[in-house]
C-alpha cells in the first residue's frame, strides 16, 4: 500500500515540475520576439538578421515582387482624339476614389440589413461530445487486478432559439440611424463622381492652357529669331553694332529657355490630367483641345434663392444633414437601455451516452429534453454607465449638428467666392485680349522700325517680351475663366454629367 502512494506522489511532483518548466519556456518566448525589431534607433532593420543588409548602415528593404503588380491600364486608341466627355467617362470607370466610395455605400447598405436581422430570431445548433477515462487504485488486490478502470462517453446535440421580442424601439432607432448613414454614403458616392467630373475638367483646361503656352513660347522664339536675322542683316551692311547682334542672340536664348520651361509645364499638366482620371502615368493618347471654347456671359451675384437651391442638392450638405438625423436616432437607441427587454428562448436537446466499468456490462443511457422560456430583463443599476452613454450620444448629436451648420456656411462661402472668381476671370480675359491686340501692333511696328533703321533693337526686344507676356496672360485668363465657370457649376451642385 505504501509503494503506490509513493509512486503517486512522485508522479504528481513530476507533473508540477513539467508545468512550471512549460510556463517558464512560454514566458521566455514572448520576450525573444524583440529580435524581430531593429536593435537600436540608429541601426537598420534587416530580415532574418542578415549581416549583409545590416552592414554600413544600409537602410534598404528587401524587394517584394507582389507589391509591384500594377492594374492593367485602360485600352486607349492611340489614333483616336478624345474629347472631354470621353475623358470623364474613362475616369468614372477607372478612378479608384469612385470605387472606394461605391464600396463604402455598399457597406452602409449592408449595415442596414444587419440591423434588420436583429428583429428575427437566432437559431443555433450545437453538438457537445466527450470522453473520460478514470483509473482508481484498489485498496486490496483482487486477483490480478490492482486498479479499477472506468470510462464514459456522451454526445449531446442541441437546437437553441433566441428571440428578442420587445425592446421599446431600440432596434428601430438603430435601423433608422443605419438608413440615414446609408443615405449619406449614397449621396457621397454621387458627390465623388461630381468631384471627379470637376477635377478632370479642371486639369483638362489646365493642360490646354499649358499646350497653348508652349505654342506661344514657340512663336516667341520665332519672333526673336526674326529680330536676330534683322540685326545680322544690319550688321552685314555695317549699320548695326556687335552689341545689337549680341542682344538679339540673348533674346533668342531667353526665348529658347521659355520654350523649354513651357514644355516642362505641359508635361506636368499632362500628368495632372492622368492623375485626375486615375489611370497609369505611362498612358499616351491624343486629346482634343478647344482653345476657342466660348466663355459664359457676365452674371450677377447668386441670389438667396439660387444659394438655397444649391444647398438643397449639394451632396456634402445632404450627407451632413443625414449624419445629424442618424445621431438623433442614436440618442433614442441609447435611451432604450433604461427600459426592460422581453426575450423568448427555446432549447431542444438529446443525449446518447455510454458508461463502462471494468468487469461489468456497459450502460448506454439515452435522454432528451425540450424547453421554452419567456424572460424579461430589467436594468436596475450600472454605476451611471447608461446615463453617461446618453450624455455621450447627445454630445455627439450636438457636435454633428454644429458640423452641419459649418458645412452649410462653407458651401455658401464657396458659392459666393466662385461667382466672384468667375466675374474677375471674365474681366481679366477681356482685358488680356485687348492687351494681346495692342502688343501685336507694338511688336510689328518695333520690328519694322528696326529693319528700316528707325527704331532700336532694345525697343524691338521689349516689344517681343511684351507680346509674349500678353499672349501668356491671355492664355491663362481664358483657362482661368473656363475653370472658374466649372468651379461655380461644381459648388452649385450642377456638375452632374460628363457633358
Image (tube, rainbow, N blue to C red):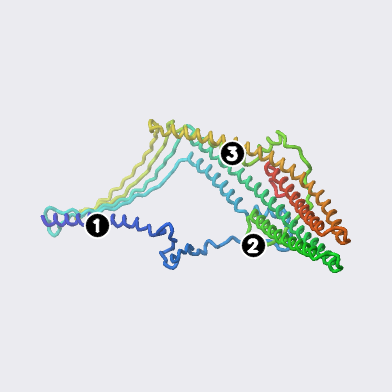
Of mark 1 and mark 3, the one earlier in the sequence is 1
Of mark 1 and mark 2, the one earlier in the sequence is 1
Q: Is residue 233 above or below residue 445?
A: below
> In the image, which disc is placed on residue 320?
3
Of mark 2 and mark 3, the one earlier in the sequence is 2
Confirm whether residue 264 shows in the render: yes
CA gap, disc 2 and disc 3:
38 Å
Element carrying mark 3: helix
Q: Which residue does the numbered mark 2 point to in the structure image?
A: 282
Left or right of 433? Residue 335 is left
Q: Is residue 237 above or below residue 219?
A: below
Task: In this rendered view, identify the residue nearer to me: 333 or 495.
Answer: 495
Residue 327 spot, x, y in % from top left:
53, 36
Task: In this rendered view, identify the residue nearer to me: 138 or 454.
Answer: 454
Residue depicted at x 69% and y 45%: 487
Q: Residues within 10 Å of mark 3 (few under 14, many from 20)?
A: many
Confirm whether residue 290 shows in the render: no
Foreground mark, 2 or 3, reads: 2
Residue 167 spot, x, y in % from top left:
46, 33
Q: Which residue does the numbered mark 1 point to in the structure image?
A: 18
Q: Residues within 10 Å of mark 2 (few under 14, many from 20)?
A: few
CA gap, disc 1 and disc 2:
64 Å
> In the image, which disc is placed on residue 436?
none
Element carrying mark 1: helix
Kindly indicate whether the residue at mark 3 contacts the one at mark 2 (C-beta within 8 angstroms).
no
- Number of dots carrying numbers: 3
Task: In this rendered view, identify the residue nearer to me: 244 or 341.
Answer: 244
Residue depicted at x 40% and y 38%: 345
Q: Is residue 304 above or below residue 295?
A: above
Q: Residues within 10 Å of mark 1 (few under 14, many from 20)?
A: few
Left or right of 328? Residue 13 is left
Element carrying mark 2: loop
Amino acid at each position: 500500500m505504501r509503494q503506490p502512494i509513493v509512486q503517486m506522489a512522485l508522479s504528481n511532483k513530476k507533473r508540477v515540475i513539467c508545468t512550471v518548466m512549460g510556463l517558464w519556456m512560454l514566458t521566455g518566448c514572448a520576450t525573444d520576439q524583440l529580435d524581430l525589431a531593429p536593435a537600436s534607433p540608429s541601426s537598420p532593420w534587416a530580415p532574418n538578421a542578415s549581416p549583409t543588409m545590416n552592414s554600413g548602415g544600409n537602410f534598404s528593404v528587401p524587394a517584394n515582387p507582389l507589391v509591384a503588380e500594377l492594374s492593367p491600364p485602360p485600352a486607349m486608341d492611340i489614333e483616336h482624339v478624345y474629347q472631354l466627355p470621353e475623358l470623364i467617362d474613362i475616369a468614372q470607370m477607372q478612378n479608384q476614389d469612385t470605387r472606394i466610395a461605391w464600396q463604402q455605400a455598399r457597406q452602409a447598405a449592408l449595415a442596414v440589413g444587419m440591423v434588420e436581422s436583429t428583429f428575427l430570431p437566432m437559431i443555433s445548433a450545437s453538438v457537445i461530445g466527450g470522453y473520460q477515462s478514470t483509473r482508481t487504485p484498489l485498496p486490496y488486490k483482487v486477483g490480478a487486478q490492482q486498479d479499477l478502470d472506468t470510462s464514459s462517453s456522451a454526445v449531446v446535440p442541441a437546437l437553441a432559439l433566441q428571440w428578442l421580442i420587445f425592446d421599446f424601439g431600440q432596434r428601430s432607432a438603430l435601423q433608422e440611424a443605419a438608413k440615414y448613414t446609408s443615405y449619406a454614403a449614397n449621396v457621397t458616392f454621387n458627390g465623388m463622381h461630381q468631384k471627379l467630373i470637376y477635377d478632370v475638367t479642371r486639369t483638362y483646361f489646365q493642360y490646354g492652357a499649358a499646350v497653348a503656352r508652349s505654342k506661344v513660347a514657340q512663336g516667341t522664339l520665332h519672333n526673336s529669331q526674326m529680330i536676330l536675322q534683322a540685326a545680322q542683316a544690319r550688321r552685314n551692311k555695317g549699320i548695326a553694332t556687335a552689341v545689337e547682334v549680341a542682344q538679339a542672340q540673348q533674346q533668342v536664348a531667353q526665348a529658347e529657355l521659355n520654350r523649354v520651361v513651357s514644355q516642362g509645364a505641359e508635361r506636368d499638366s499632362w500628368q495632372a490630367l492622368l492623375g485626375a482620371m486615375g489611370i497609369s502615368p505611362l498612358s499616351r493618347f491624343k486629346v482634343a483641345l478647344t482653345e476657342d471654347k466660348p466663355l459664359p456671359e457676365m452674371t450677377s451675384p447668386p441670389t438667396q434663392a439660387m444659394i438655397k437651391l444649391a444647398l438643397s442638392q449639394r451632396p456634402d450638405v445632404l450627407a451632413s444633414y443625414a449624419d445629424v438625423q442618424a445621431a438623433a436616432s442614436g440618442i433614442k437607441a441609447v435611451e432604450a437601455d433604461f427600459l426592460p427587454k422581453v426575450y423568448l428562448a427555446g432549447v431542444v436537446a438529446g443525449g446518447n451516452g455510454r458508461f463502462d466499468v471494468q468487469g461489468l456490462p456497459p450502460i448506454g443511457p439515452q435522454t432528451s429534453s425540450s424547453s421554452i422560456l419567456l424572460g424579461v430583463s430589467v436594468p436596475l443599476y450600472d454605476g451611471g454607465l447608461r446615463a453617461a452613454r446618453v450624455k455621450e450620444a447627445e454630445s455627439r448629436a450636438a457636435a454633428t449638428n454644429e458640423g452641419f451648420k459649418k458645412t452649410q456656411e462653407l458651401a455658401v462661402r464657396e458659392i459666393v467666392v466662385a461667382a466672384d472668381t468667375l466675374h474677375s476671370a471674365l474681366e481679366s480675359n477681356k482685358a488680356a485680349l485687348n492687351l494681346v491686340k495692342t502688343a501685336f501692333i507694338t511688336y510689328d511696328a518695333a520690328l519694322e522700325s528696326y529693319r528700316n533703321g528707325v527704331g532700336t533693337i532694345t525697343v524691338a526686344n521689349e516689344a517681343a517680351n511684351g507680346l509674349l507676356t500678353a499672349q501668356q496672360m491671355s492664355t491663362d485668363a481664358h483657362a482661368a475663366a473656363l475653370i472658374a465657370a466649372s468651379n461655380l457649376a461644381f459648388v452649385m451642385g450642377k456638375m452632374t454629367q460628363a457633358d
